[in-house]
Image (cartoon, grey):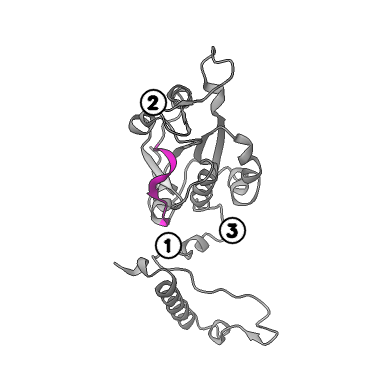
Amino acid sequence: MVFRPFLSPAALYFCPMRIDIITLFPEMFEGFLSQSILKRAQDKGLANLHIHQLRDYVAQDNKHKNVDDYAFGGGAGMVMAVEPIINCMEHLEKTVRYDEKIFVTPDGERLTQKRVNSLSIKENLLILCGRYKGVDQRIRDHFITMELSIGDYVLSGGELAAAVIADSVVRLIPGVLSDESSALLDSFQGDLLDAPVYTRPAEYRGMKVPEVLLSGNEAKIDEWRYQQSLEKTKLRRPDLLKD
């Protein structure tokens, strides 16, 4: 087990984080993984992301590479079958020990910054993307260790949710962001929404930057930002202040 003291949302790493994603649509991740933060993390050797085509793990006698079937008991929608998913997971687990095996689903635990923080100090993550009506419940009961949702709505599949999880976790790895303190000041890190931010010019078409931000007084600036964060949170997300 790699020792990573919890010094920040992600801590000191002695080996790259590995994320494996199982999907029926690997092409959906090509552009996402080759740009921005995730590309930077991989180029720096801080994270390894691997995409696996589920159809590669169907039985050899399955000529049409079917990965779904009708639901027992009837009802609309097809269900992703047990065999190819288990085949894929067992193949991967021959060489990787996963800290969490995640299924992305609308009825899972709501993804929060606290959960992202906890995932960012893991070593190996596996994410299963559902499609159709969902996956056979036996997968969820016996092979999945965590179920996550990115919101109370339904998408066509789990790929977008898996990408959101990967991005939110990887950006917290020390060295990924140019300014590591930036991640510590994001909205939700302290149960408050982030304060307003401004850049040059200090005045544009009569619209001025608050004077306190130009004062150079760090204590006053910190206090202003805290008050702004508090007021924004009270107005937009009072639920975050209930505790």
Q: Which residue is mark 3?
A: 178
Classify residue 209 by image quadrant: bottom right
Residue that carries the numbered disc 1 in the rendered image: 189
Task: Name the N-terminal-most of marks 1 and 2.
Answer: 2
Q: Residue at x 58, y 15 (%)?
A: 63
Contact (Cβ within 8 Å) of mark 3 with mark 1: no
**Which is more N-terminal, label 3 or label 2?**
2
Q: Residue furthest right?
A: 205
* Viewport quadrant of the C terminus: bottom left
In this rendered view, identify the residue nearer to me: 240 or 178. Answer: 240
> What is the CA distance from the residue labelled 3 to the residue labelled 1?
18 Å
Label 1: state its secondary structure: loop
Q: Which residues are magenta?
A: 99-113
The amino acid type, in three-letter code, at marker 1 is: Gln
Residue 61 position in % (x across, y down): 54, 12
Q: Which residue is rendered at x = 55% and y = 83% of the image? A: 216
Q: Is residue 40 above or below residue 128?
A: below
Q: Is residue 195 above or below residue 55?
A: below
Task: Report helix, strand or loop for mark 3.
Answer: loop
107 magenta-colored: yes
On the image, the x and y values in percent for residue 191 come to 39, 65
Q: Which residue is mark 2?
A: 72
Answer with left or right where residue 103 lies relative to residue 155: left
Does the residue at mark 1 contact the one at mark 2 (Cβ under 8 Å)?
no
Quarter of the image for the N terminus: give it. top left
- The image shows residue 139 at horizontal and vertical percentages of 39, 30
